[in-house]
Image (cartoon, helix red, strand yellow):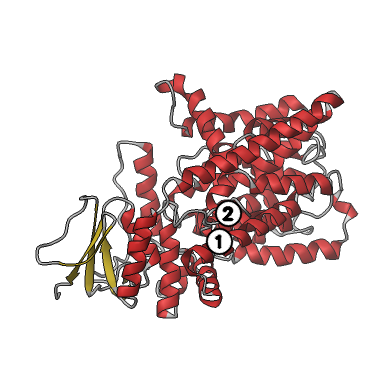
């Protein structure tokens, strides 16, 4: 709680977007970017997941807490929900005491802390995702046979969860939901789950189609499709009751090679820099977890030691693509990977500790706790370094009192614009209108040859999304501003001739310019 307290003013890279959405909800008393049911899945311009902005706006309105206080409350809620949800997931395989410790380690992981500190929609996703996984797998501990659970209880769980998976709540990160729907459909189909048992072939196909639709909402998720198909090839091997360590290592090697292909080299150029890139990315995102996650996958003392359970096979199958996705250049892959990496890391750590002399065990636990706390502190510290300076905060609050209604547009150098924008009510304000050009009946296909694989993936993702994207509507993030405010900070920034100076304190000047008629 102390780590998530707003010791600084507004911070984060794209946190301001979520506050902009909450401001629009508060000022417009509606969700202006939801112009069609397809908006819930991101297939309309400027569409964003609605639950986090609505939650943030509600907290700020009801509690009269302002931006800083509202984000603090939402961050605490996200943190508590995330720790509780992962404790529930870990409790499916580990003892209650170890599961609670795993929940705390999940909450202090760098990826989770990055999105729970001034929590955004990605933080809400990380808080809910472990609970979704826990509900999808069978209840009970490791080694529990499917036959030990009553049919009615299993069927009721799967019917309820199948409905959730086919109609996923579009309030979080759609690409990761799509990847997981793919994993669920392929897992149910190929892990020995028969048509007359838990879920039918038609339901598995529906999950695959739902996952495909969600994957199309973001090009990053297309990277996961071949990885999921590669993991599906291992499903037949997972049907055996026990897997030797050599087989488990062999199953993970293709995914480790894929991880190396995704990493940006560090320290040295080319192939020589891949170990440095893997180390840097792994430590920054997951701290202490990745080496122990490999131990958990290879030793699998609790999670997947018995392949008789659907839960063990399914989680092992989902963890395989999590290895390379953890190193995907953007953070979306890490969002999907974190629950599986953390689960196997805790399992692998306790397996290694159990093999140590008693005198070493306490020190090993202390070292991991220290590393987890250090990772969380470093993450919060790095984010706090780019926080809104106090003098800029005071200038933003002056503008909020000067023009509380808007709409207006802010111009400022660097990140100062987003910092100011977060604290004012008149910006950003959506403007929804008919598009100037009609949408073509069939999207144009990309050229057959593009210079890089990344450009090819981007082009095909855009083309495939065009099949379902509603482009007949134009949504302008900044609406039709009647006034422009130009910030000049320590001489940086510019303003048009004739603009009126309305503020000049502590090296921050604000100039007011009326918008030109269109």
Q: Which residue is located at x 52 percent, y 68 percent?
A: 56
Q: Which residue is mark 1?
A: 72
- Binning the other alpha carbons within 10 Å of mark 2 as few (below 14), some (14 to 19) or many (20 upward) gives some
- Determine the secondary structure under disc 2: loop
Q: Report whether 498 appears left or right of 329.
A: left
Is there CB contact under 8 Å for labels 2 and 1? yes
Q: Nearer the viewer, residue 283 or 319?
A: 283
| Distance of label 2 from label 1 (alpha carbons) | 7 Å
Looking at the rendered image, the quarter that the C terminus falls into is bottom left
Residue 249, quarter of the rendered image: top right
Few, some or many C-alpha atoms within 10 Å of disc 1 (few <14, some 14-19, many ≥20)? Answer: many
Q: Residue at x 41, y 47 (%)?
A: 386
Q: Nearer the viewer, residue 211 or 303?
A: 303
The correct choice, above or below, for 485 with respect to 413 in the image is below
Q: Residue at x 66, y 27 (%)?
A: 250
x then y, percent, for residue 189: 68, 51
Left or right position of 419 against 296 = left
Dot 2 corresponds to which residue? 4
Residue 452 percent coordinates (x, y):
34, 36
Q: Quadrant of the N terminus?
A: bottom right
């Amino acid at each position: 709680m102390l780590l998530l307290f707003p010791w600084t003013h507004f911070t984060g890279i794209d946190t301001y977007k979520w506050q902009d959405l909450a401001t629009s909800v508060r000022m417009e008393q509606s969700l202006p970017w939801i112009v069609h049911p397809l908006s819930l899945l991101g297939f309309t311009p400027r569409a964003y997941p609605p639950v986090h902005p609505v939650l943030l706006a509600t907290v700020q309105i009801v509690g009269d807490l302002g931006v800083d206080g509202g984000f603090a409350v939402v961050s605490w809620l996200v943190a508590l929900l995330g720790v509780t949800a992962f404790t529930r997931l870990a409790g499916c395989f580990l003892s209650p005491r170890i599961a609670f410790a795993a929940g705390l380690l999940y909450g202090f992981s760098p990826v989770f802390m990055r999105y729970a500190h001034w929590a955004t929609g990605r933080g809400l996703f990380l808080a809910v995702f472990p609970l979704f996984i826990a509900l999808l797998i069978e209840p009970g501990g490791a080694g529990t046979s499917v036959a030990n659970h009553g049919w009615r209880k299993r069927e009721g769980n799967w019917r309820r969860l199948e409905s959730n998976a086919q109609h996923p709540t579009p309030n979080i990160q759609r690409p990761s939901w799509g990847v997981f729907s793919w994993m669920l459909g392929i897992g149910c189909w190929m892990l020995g789950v028969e048509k007359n048992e838990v879920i039918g072939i038609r339901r598995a196909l529906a999950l695959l189609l739902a996952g495909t639709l969600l994957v199309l909402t973001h090009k990053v998720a297309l990277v996961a499709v071949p990885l999921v198909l590669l993991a599906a090839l291992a499903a037949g091997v997972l049907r055996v009751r026990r897997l030797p360590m050599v087989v488990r290592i062999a199953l993970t090697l293709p995914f480790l090679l894929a991880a190396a292909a995704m990493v940006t080299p560090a320290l040295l150029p080319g192939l020589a820099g891949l170990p440095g890139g893997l180390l840097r990315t792994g430590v920054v995102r997951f701290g202490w977890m990745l080496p122990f996650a490999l131990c958990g996958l290879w030793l699998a003392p609790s999670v997947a030691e018995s392949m008789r359970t659907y839960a063990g096979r399914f989680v092992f199958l989902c963890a395989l693509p999590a290895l390379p996705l953890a190193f995907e250049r953007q953070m979306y892959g890490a969002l999907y990977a974190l629950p599986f990496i953390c689960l196997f890391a805790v399992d692998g750590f306790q397996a290694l500790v159990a093999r140590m002399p008693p005198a070493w065990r306490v020190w090993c636990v202390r070292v991991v706790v220290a590393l987890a706390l250090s990772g969380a502190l470093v993450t919060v510290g790095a984010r706090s370094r780019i926080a809104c300076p106090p003098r800029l905060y005071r200038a933003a609050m002056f503008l909020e009192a000067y023009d509380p209604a808007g709409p207006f547009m802010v111009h400022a150098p660097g990140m100062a614009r987003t910092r100011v924008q977060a604290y004012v009510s008149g910006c950003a304000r959506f403007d929804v209108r008919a598009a100037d050009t009609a949408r073509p009946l069939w999207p144009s296909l990309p050229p057959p040859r593009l210079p890089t694989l990344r450009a090819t993936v981007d082009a095909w993702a855009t083309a495939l999304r065009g099949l379902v994207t509603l482009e007949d509507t134009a949504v302008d993030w900044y609406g039709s501003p009647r006034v422009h405010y130009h910030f000049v900070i320590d001489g940086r920034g510019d303003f048009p001739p004739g603009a009126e100076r309305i503020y000049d304190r502590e090296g921050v000047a604000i100039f007011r310019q009326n918008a030109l008629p269109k």
